[in-house]
């Protein structure tokens, strides 16, 4: 029973990480949005699996809230923004694809290195997935700093949050429900404010390329 | 009446009132100003409880809790919140903001104050995190109050870097919780400070250290610690003056508060060496970047922002110097909150008159606005650590702590960096104060009543420079006791 559980959770975590890596080699916000949607769906699934095997009914609510927020609401808002800015030309990132993939590979390895004490300490059958979650956190950070489009940065940020949510669910079977709901509310509000700012950037700069955001120096 | 309700209720009510009244009416601002005094009163009540030796708690599982550290921060936040309520847009007179902007300011500034107050009195690290994340959202909404290319850029950098930082702090919180759950199992109130502190000595050292690195980087981003400070000068210089005052004066302090809380837990788990080294390194780096950036500043609001980075660094160095250093750092935090918010309000008056943030565009400040110029000069002199202002005393205490801890080289380096900041800020100040005002700049104070509260703040700084009142000394001693227990 435990071995099925542990295999399922590792498989789920790997899928979550792989959807994060898509940001590195695909071009185009449309592909990023669907990668994020699928990633969130898998994350919600992993949460439900942990709820089932861990006999934790609160986690079902977390899985449902996650699904509604990150598979239904946020992707819909992202697609609406994407249609609005569809005419903009795609920009080459600061780091090319091959280098990006190499760096991400190293980051995932680094994730394994820093989570070693966690895996050694934990008794939970889900522990083997934690390094993958940490890897996703680090890769998302890299995406945020190496991309030039505001919308891509936002998707990188959302994936960073997915990585942290995965870490929480694998490591501790989820933080207390009431705190989790507060976190979801913050994610939603934060996303809405970022959306407002992207529209503002578009209006004042006539593009959402963050390379132009360089007036403020020193 | 419940003290916590009196503390948190007024900003919530004021925000709801501002949201309900559309279009904006002046009575909203005045009600807000009066309500802010109620919050301030509640913070003073908390202080009195600390002096009497008890710690107020409220709600199930001690949901809210105000020990000495929370109380100091609640005092700072409510003072600056009250200043922002009295001096913010929409109190009548020509302040450069229209009704819609005043309404937006009243809604979000009050929510911002509410979240900062909630963050410091929440006993639960999870809710503290939620509140600090919410401070990013509410304050970011106010940076582009005047939509310009520069303010839009500043707000984007702020929300992106701030959100990423705070997400990493969440990762650290999760790792800390992970450590706790592995030790004691899942239980009610596991994210409470009191519970975490009680079990801290048995936490797994490597895991809690990893958690602390995430927490320091995460909350450190919001506290303006180098090298994660890059959003700060932009946001502080482009934001409207009352918001700059709140961000520089107390938001940085609230973020530091979160780090300090976790520092207590980690110290109890692995001893003080680990956190002290990290604090010293990041503090020195922030001091250096702040000080050298001051040299090349041409914009006076950015100058004040870099000075905040420098002072945050100084507080961090102090926190790594044992009990005496902790005492000095907490006193410095209070002094800096008062001084920096006062100067940012004054800078707002200067900007409104001269219509430029360039230092070279402002000349003859003492002729054009004698009182504003005088108070601005006093504020800058206070910030660079001259007597008779409070910051001189706290910096002096910090140096004493450093020498007592046997770190003369460290203190020498800090002193050299402070000297760099001193010289460059004096130079910039001189260029602004003297000479003849540029053509087209009106001479005379304009509406003078806002100078009264700001003058009171400067007077308070002088008092703190001449004496350390007993109630304050007791409060700070209690904070040091928390660290030692």
Image (spheres, rainbow, N blue to C red):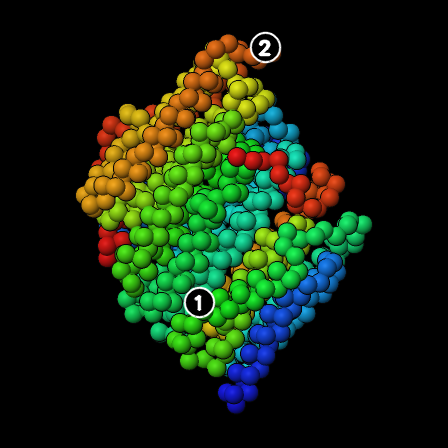
Letter of the chain that mark 1 sits on in the rendering: A
Q: Position of residue B450 (x, y in %)?
A: 47, 23
- Side of B344 relative to A84 (left or right): left
Above or below for B223 versus A64: above
Mark 2 vs mark 1: in front: 1
Which residue position is annotated with label 2? B439
Question: Is residue B376 visible in this depiction of the protein?
Answer: yes
Name the residue located 23 percent from the left edge and 54 percent from the top edge. Answer: B484
Q: Residues within 10 Å of mark 1 (few under 14, many from 20)?
A: some
Q: Residues within 10 Å of mark 2 (few under 14, many from 20)?
A: few
Name the residue located 66 percent from the left edge and 44 percent from the top edge. Answer: A211
Asked if labels 2 and 1 share a chain, the reply is no
In contact (CB < 8 Å): disc 2 and disc 1: no
Name the residue located 66 percent from the left edge and 53 percent from the top edge. Answer: A93
* Towards the viewer: B427 or B59: B427
Q: The C terminus of chain B lies in which quarter of the figure? A: bottom left
Which residue position is annotated with label 1? A114
Q: Position of residue B393 (x, y in %)?
A: 26, 32
Q: Position of residue B321 (x, y in %)?
A: 26, 47
Q: Position of residue A31 (x, y in %)?
A: 73, 63
């Amino acid at each position: 029973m435990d071995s099925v559980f542990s295999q399922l959770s590792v498989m789920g975590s790997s899928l979550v990480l792989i959807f994060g890596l898509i940001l590195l080699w695909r071009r185009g916000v449309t592909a990023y949005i669907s990668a994020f949607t699928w990633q969130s769906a898998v994350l919600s699934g992993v949460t439900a699996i942990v709820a089932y095997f861990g006999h934790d009914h609160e986690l079902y609510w977390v899985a449902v809230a996650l699904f509604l927020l990150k598979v239904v609401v946020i992707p819909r808002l992202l697609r609406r923004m994407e249609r609005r800015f569809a005419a903009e030309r795609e920009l080459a990132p600061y780091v090319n694809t091959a280098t990006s993939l190499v760096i991400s590979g190293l980051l995932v390895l680094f994730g394994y290195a820093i989570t070693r004490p966690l895996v050694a300490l934990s008794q939970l059958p889900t522990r083997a997935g934690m390094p993958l979650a940490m890897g996703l956190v680090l890769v998302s950070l890299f995406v945020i700093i190496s991309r030039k489009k505001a919308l891509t940065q936002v998707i990188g940020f959302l994936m960073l949050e997915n990585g942290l949510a995965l870490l929480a669910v694998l490591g501790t079977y989820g933080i207390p429900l009431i705190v989790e709901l507060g976190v979801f509310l913050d994610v939603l509000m934060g996303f809405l404010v970022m959306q407002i700012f992207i529209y503002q950037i578009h209006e004042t700069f006539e593009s959402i390329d963050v390379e132009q955001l360089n007036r403020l120096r020193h | 009446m419940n003290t916590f309700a009196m503390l948190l209720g007024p900003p919530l009510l004021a925000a709801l009132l501002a949201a309900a009244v559309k279009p904006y009416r002046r009575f909203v601002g005045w009600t807000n100003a009066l309500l802010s005094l109620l919050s301030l009163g509640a913070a003073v009540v908390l202080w009195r409880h600390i002096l009497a030796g008890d710690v107020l708690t409220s709600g199930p599982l001690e949901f809210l809790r105000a020990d000495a550290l929370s109380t100091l921060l609640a005092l700072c936040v409510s003072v600056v919140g009250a200043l922002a309520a009295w001096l913010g847009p929409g109190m009548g007179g020509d302040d450069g903001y229209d009704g819609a902007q005043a309404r937006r300011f009243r809604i979000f500034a009050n929510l911002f104050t509410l979240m900062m107050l909630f963050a410091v009195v929440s006993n639960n690290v999870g809710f503290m995190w939620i509140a600090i994340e919410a401070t990013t959202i509410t304050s970011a909404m106010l940076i582009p109050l005047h939509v310009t290319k520069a303010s839009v850029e500043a707000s984007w950098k702020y929300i992106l870097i701030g959100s990423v930082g705070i997400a990493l702090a969440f990762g650290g919180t999760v790792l800390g919780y992970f450590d706790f759950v592995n030790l004691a199992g899942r239980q009610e109130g596991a994210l409470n400070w009191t519970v975490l502190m009680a079990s801290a000595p048995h936490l797994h050292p490597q895991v809690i250290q990893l958690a602390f690195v995430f927490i320091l980087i995460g909350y450190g981003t919001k506290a303006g610690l180098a090298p994660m400070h890059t959003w700060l000068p932009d946001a502080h210089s482009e934001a409207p003056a009352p918001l700059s005052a709140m961000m520089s004066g107390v938001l940085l302090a609230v973020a530091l508060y979160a780090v300090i809380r976790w520092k207590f837990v980690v110290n109890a788990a692995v001893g003080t060496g680990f956190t002290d080294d990290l604090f010293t390194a990041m503090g020195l780096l922030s001091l250096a970047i702040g000080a050298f950036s001051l040299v090349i500043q041409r914009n006076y609001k950015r100058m004040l922002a870099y000075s905040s980075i420098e002072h945050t660094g100084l507080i961090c160095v102090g926190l790594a110097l044992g009990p005496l250093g902790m005492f000095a750092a907490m006193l410095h935090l209070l002094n800096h909150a008062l001084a920096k918010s006062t100067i940012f309000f004054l800078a707002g008056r200067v900007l409104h008159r001269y219509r430029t943030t360039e230092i070279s565009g402002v000349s003859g400040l003492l002729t054009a606005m004698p009182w504003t110029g005088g108070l601005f000069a006093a504020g800058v002199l206070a910030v660079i650590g001259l007597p008779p202002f409070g910051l001189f005393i706290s910096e002096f205490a910090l140096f004493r702590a450093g020498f007592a801890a046997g770190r003369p080289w460290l203190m020498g380096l800090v002193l050299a960096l402070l000297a760099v900041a001193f010289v460059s800020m004096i130079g910039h100040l001189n260029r602004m104060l003297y000479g003849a005002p540029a053509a087209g700049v009106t001479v005379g104070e304009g509406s003078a009543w806002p100078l009264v509260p700001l003058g009171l703040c400067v007077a308070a700084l002088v008092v703190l420079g001449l004496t350390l009142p007993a109630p304050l000394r007791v409060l700070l001693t209690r904070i040091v006791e928390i660290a030692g227990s």
